[in-house]
Amino acid sequence: MVGVDFSDERSREEQAAPMSAPAKSNRPVCVLGLGLIGGSLMRAARAADREVFGYNRSLDGVEAARFDGFDASADLDDVLRRASDATALIVLAVPMPALPTMLDHIRVAAPNCPLTDVTSVKVAVLQAVQDHDLLARFVGGHPMTGTAHSGWTAGAANLFVGAPWVISVDDHVDAEVWADVMQLALDCGSFVVPARSDEHDAAAAAISHLPHLVAEAVAATAADVPLAFALAAGSFRDGTRVAATSPDLVRAMCEANADPLRNALSRTIDLLVHARDGLATTGSVADLVESGHAARTHYDDYTRPEIATVTIGSDDWRRELAAAGRAGGVVRSALPTLGNRG
Amino acid sequence: MVGVDFSDERSREEQAAPMSAPAKSNRPVCVLGLGLIGGSLMRAARAADREVFGYNRSLDGVEAARFDGFDASADLDDVLRRASDATALIVLAVPMPALPTMLDHIRVAAPNCPLTDVTSVKVAVLQAVQDHDLLARFVGGHPMTGTAHSGWTAGAANLFVGAPWVISVDDHVDAEVWADVMQLALDCGSFVVPARSDEHDAAAAAISHLPHLVAEAVAATAADVPLAFALAAGSFRDGTRVAATSPDLVRAMCEANADPLRNALSRTIDLLVHARDGLATTGSVADLVESGHAARTHYDDYTRPEIATVTIGSDDWRRELAAAGRAGGVVRSALPTLGNRG
């Protein structure tokens, strides 16, 4: 329970008050990739009075952003030179396959900028960043939001409001960069869930990638049964909703998180095999049904206590934040950093 | 495609017109069990100007129904004597475990009444009816509707409006009784899906019982992963929604349909094992994701053509209706019966 305050949320301002909050960051934000997430981030950052500029590979995206009055360019090296000159916070908002190329350019043109990302897997990104020798200034992130649409025009300044934004607290992370990424997430209206990259990926496998594959399997199973679609109602419709997601997107998510997803699949397969065997032997599915119901009830009752007592950069702050996040804690207003204490 | 009219629904009245519809049934309806489904059926039948009376085991239910102005009693044998005198259509609306007792009483007090049920499995009910030597006047049914609540007070006259109501077309079914059950379903606002009992149960396993067990397994898997509930969003929330259903209800449904459910589970397990193996070997989950997406797309595009050309009681009518139902066909206005042709 380290660092977690389980008291009522309404009192959080009062509790945060005794320690002075850091001055709001004036660091410019440089967004690489102006699709749904990057484009929304650009809008949200400007709405929070942050200086923000960005790069997009396609001219269409650049022109759409400029048409809406934003500072966008298709010249990556020029954008990175500006970022380096201003020591901007660089946000990687490109799809996984484009990541190595971006990191190649950053290593040459802007190696000293603080760096984050908004990708849905964290260990694979961390590995790529390490391979490009950019780990020192990198803190991974994952805003848990989205829509069914993509591209600049699908974005919105309020996309992040009220959504969890995971920020990595791996052993290497720098306190100053962490505070910068936290401030960006809070500026966008999110609350912050601190988590280790490996724990993030295991959790994402269980609550996102596994449900996608299971929905695909249920839909495919029903498709082979005559009359099934004729009788399909709520439990099938809801249970297979995410099978309507673009196959490319589902594959990209799942295949980039293969090891944790295999673990989650194995656990689910074991539970289903046990239920099938129970039907054949005792005629009972009690074990699965009772544990599933208890789990869902626990989820429905889940609360998010405020993390209010960790100082970024203090002794053991990474471990404290990881433990607090693991216990369900979230950051709703900027935590103090060691250098900023009043 | 036997008996299925794939033309636009808007023309169905025109197409049904040439053959005279049967006179609306004046047969009284006797409902045994006044819970959510039975109680709603009583309300819906009366709203359709049908004479309706019923039995409920608990006095609370009887009093609640009477308070609302309905003809309800806790004296089973008295209710069945009335049903026998009026040759009422008896509707079994009790839970599976209460079925044998009801059938014992019906065999003694009202063996000649047409008989149907509203239970969510069909082969097990058919077997129980056969064991009680009541098959000759029995046609099984399953209105595919419900709410999260139970008991008389949870019922509503419009519960069945727009919902599929499966009516069995097993080899033994009597044309007159089938027409009576069809008329009741239409009077309640449902459309009718004709289906063999075994095909109903296989389909129900795939689109209802399997999704329930899979939701339980996903919820139980996530519960063991730290941080999972902290990150859970739409795909988890929707994918595990039905795990919130009462465990007793889920067990009753699944355990009464064990054999078809084992088949559906085996198919789903095979698909998930294949995906897990794919992640370990080629790194790809393409097979599962593509077949699942295609299945869900097929479901989203699914239409229900009107069955308009089968005459109940004609040569081969049961096989024709089963084939039409299997092809997605539904009955939206009363089909003619052989004796009623103009």
Image: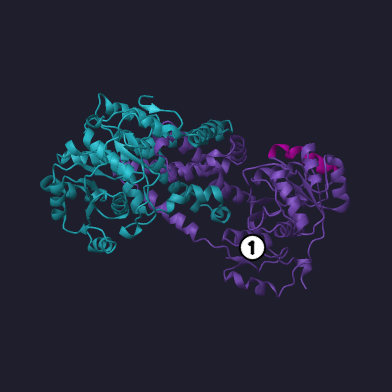
Chain colours: A purple, B cyan
| Residue A191 percent across, percent down from the top left | 65, 59
Q: Classify mark 1: helix, strand or loop.
A: helix
| Residue B296 percent across, percent down from the top left | 50, 36
Determine the residue positioned at 33% across, 39% down.
B166
Crowdedness near tag 1: few (<14), some (14–19) or many (≥20) residues, C-alpha within 10 Å:
many
**Residue under circle 1?**
A320
- Whether residue B213 sits left or right of residue B130 in the image: it is right
Q: Is residue B240 above or below residue A302?
A: above
Q: Which residue is nearer to you in this view: A151 or B232?
A: A151
The C terminus of chain A lies in quadrant: bottom right
Asked whether the viewer can see residue A35, the reply is: no
| Residue A132 percent across, percent down from the top left | 77, 42
Q: Quadrant of residue B27?
A: top left
- Whether residue A309 sits left or right of residue B36 in the image: it is right
Residue A271 in magenta stretch: no
Q: Residue furthest left?
A: B108
Q: Is residue A260 above or below residue A300?
A: above
Q: Is residue B155 above or below residue B307?
A: below
**Residue range highlighted in magenta:** A96-109
